[in-house]
Amino acid sequence: QVQLVESGGGLVQAGGSTRLSCAISGRTVSAYNMAWFRQTPGKEREFVVGIKRSGITTYSNSVKGRFTISRDNAKNLVYLEMNTLKPEDTAVYYCAADPRTSAFLPIRQDENEYDYWGQGTQVTVSS
């Protein structure tokens, strides 16, 4: 069974930076499109950024230019570098994997399209 485990996060001051990691076991990460979502209490889970098997990335407008997703297929790791953090970035961040990939279609941004999820990690940005 595929398992995803997030690490990192914590309390960061506004304007600061942090880095999240997602470790994948059971299959190689190269077999999946990967994404980060985030969720705050009472709100739906929100797409943040995704990366296809090819390396093509798609960013939410709210984080574009501040966050960077990357993948290390040899280590089965996906990263989320978060810079210039804002209080509105405060959320639980989830790593997700989608095995139904296409070289021609854009990455999926609907949480229901992803089969595998990590447990989430809290990022809190103080003002």
Image (spheres, rainbow, N blue to C red):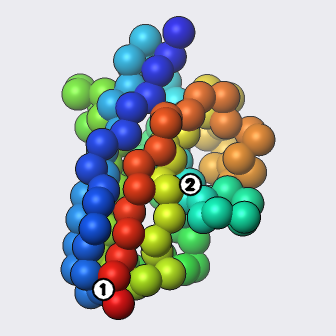
Q: Residue at x 26, y 73 (%)?
A: 12
Quadrant of the image containing the C terminus: bottom left
Q: Residues within 10 Å of mark 2 (few under 14, many from 20)?
A: many
Rendered position, 83 above or below 28: below
Rendered location of residue 77, percent (x, y): 30, 35
Would you say 11 lies left or right of 33 here? left
Amino acid type, callout 1: Ala
Using the image as rendered, state which of residue 43 and residue 22 is in the foreground.
Answer: 43
Which structural element holds mark 2? Answer: strand
Amino acid type, callout 2: Phe
Q: Are marks 1 and 2 in contact (CB under 8 Å)?
A: no
Q: Residue at x 54, y 39 (%)?
A: 96
Rendered location of residue 76, percent (x, y): 31, 27
Q: Which numbered dot is residue 33?
A: none
Q: Residue at x 56, y 34 (%)?
A: 117
- Look at mark 2 in the image and give the residue it sits on: 37
Q: CA distance from mark 1 to mark 2?
A: 20 Å
Would you say 92 lies left or right of 17 here? right
Residue 15 is at least partly visible in this image:
yes
- Look at mark 1 in the image and give the residue it sits on: 14
Q: Residue at x 64, y 63 (%)?
A: 41
